[in-house]
Image (cartoon, grey):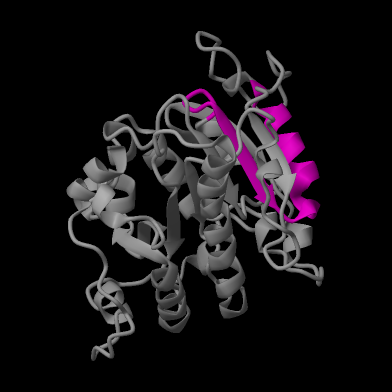
């Protein structure tokens, strides 16, 4: 099975961080790296738009420095683009990525992103490679998501369409229908099959969370949302009746290392619910390997019989 092949490439699981080891598990992530401050990790918090090239295509990303600096209730960090996102999007789109090589990601995949922020960048980069990509975040980002999807529509059109564009130039094609935005608040909203925005699809193959771990108060809501989304796979199979079990939903978490205590809190909470692997440097892109302080983990729910997948 695809997940079995993936875990074989990644090697042993992350050790249990609650085993009382000294030093703590975060020591092994931080000890040999010079963790840069990087302005918390923004690409450019003062720019209203950004020009980027990701996976060989040019993108214009509109963002809101004003919202970032406001006192909006519920948080403002999604109002600008974070540095890990373009690097992660480039990595996950690469055919040499272990997720593609093992078949965990495929043209038939349905993907959901938690905390996508204003850019929708990863969804746009993967638009032509997967069947459906669902962007989710608090509802305030929706107008920027719509703007960015429209601005970059040429990259979401059918293969063969020119992909080079310049800011301000009219788009050549309407946005692809396989990238959609759905509001989802981790603390307030219920995770249901309706998140797929499709009557034919009831669960997700992959869950992505990209640089969402910066506040210890959000660790449990985020991890619980990851759990709830992954559980949709089993409940969808129950509704469908007896048949060949499908691959478990894979959860992918990319993040910049900042506060070791917050990272420690996240890895402990995530590890409670997920069999967890860290993507080794040998399977990362040159950009991610060259930029210290960025890590990617993958996991499957502990309720999944591991012997079937590893």
- The residue shown at (22%, 52%) is 10
Using the image as rendered, state which of residue 169 and residue 113 is in the foreground: 113
Residue 123, picture quadrant: top right
Q: Residue at position x 73%, y 44% from top?
A: 182
Furthest toward the front, the residue is: 242
- What residue lies at 38% left-to-right and 70% top-to-bottom? 271
Task: Tell me, yes or no, if residue 66 can be seen here.
Answer: yes
Whole-percent x, y for residue 248 in the image = 41, 46
Horizontally, is 208 left or right of 171 in the view? left
Please provide percent x and percent y for residue 178: 62, 27
283 left or right, relative to 174: left
Residue bounds of the magenta highlight: 127-153
| On screen, residue 20 above or below 309 | below
The one of 300 and 51 positioned closer to us in this rendering? 300
Instruction: Based on the picture, tell me whether residue 129 belongs to the magenta stretch.
Output: yes
Residue 73 lies, with reference to residue 242, above or below; the image says below
**In x, y percent, where is residue 98?**
28, 40
| Nearest the eye: 12 or 71 | 12
Q: Where the N terminus falls, by quadrant? A: top left
In the rendered image of this protein, does residue 297 appear above or below residue 269? Answer: above
Image quarter for residue 106? top left
Image point (47%, 40%), residue name: 205
**Is 33 inside the magenta-drawn segment?**
no
Does residue 285 appear left or right of residue 175 in this picture? left
């Amino acid at each position: 099975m695809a997940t079995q092949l993936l875990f074989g490439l990644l090697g042993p699981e992350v050790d249990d961080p609650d085993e009382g080891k000294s030093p703590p598990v975060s020591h092994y992530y931080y000890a040999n790296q010079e963790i840069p401050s990087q302005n918390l990790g923004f690409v450019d918090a003062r720019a209203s738009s950004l020009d980027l090239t990701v996976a060989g295509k040019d993108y214009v990303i509109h963002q809101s420095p004003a919202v970032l600096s406001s006192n909006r209730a519920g948080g403002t960090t999604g109002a600008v683009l974070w540095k890990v996102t373009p690097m992660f999007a480039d990595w996950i789109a690469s055919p040499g990525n272990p997720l593609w090589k093992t078949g965990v990601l495929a043209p038939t995949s349905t993907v959901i992103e938690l905390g996508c922020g204003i850019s929708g960048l990863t969804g746009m980069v993967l638009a032509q490679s997967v069947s459906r990509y669902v962007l989710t975040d608090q509802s305030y980002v929706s107008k920027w998501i719509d703007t960015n999807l429209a601005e970059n529509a040429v990259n979401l059109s059918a293969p063969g369409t020119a992909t080079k564009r310049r800011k301000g130039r009219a788009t050549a094609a309407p946005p692809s229908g396989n990238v959609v935005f759905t509001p989802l608040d981790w603390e307030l909203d219920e995770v249901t099959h309706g998140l797929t925005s499709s009557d034919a699809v009831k669960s997700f193959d992959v869950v992505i969370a990209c640089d969402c771990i910066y506040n210890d108060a959000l660790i449990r809501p985020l991890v619980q949302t990851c759990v709830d989304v992954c559980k949709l796979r089993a409940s969808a199979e129950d509704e469908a009746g007896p048949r060949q079990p499908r691959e478990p939903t894979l959860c992918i978490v990319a993040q910049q290392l900042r506060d070791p205590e917050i990272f420690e809190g996240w890895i402990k909470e995530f590890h409670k619910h997920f069999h967890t692997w860290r993507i080794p440097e040998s399977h990362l892109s040159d950009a991610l390997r060259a930029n210290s302080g960025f890590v990617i983990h993958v996991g499957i729910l502990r309720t999944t019989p591991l012997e079937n997948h590893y």
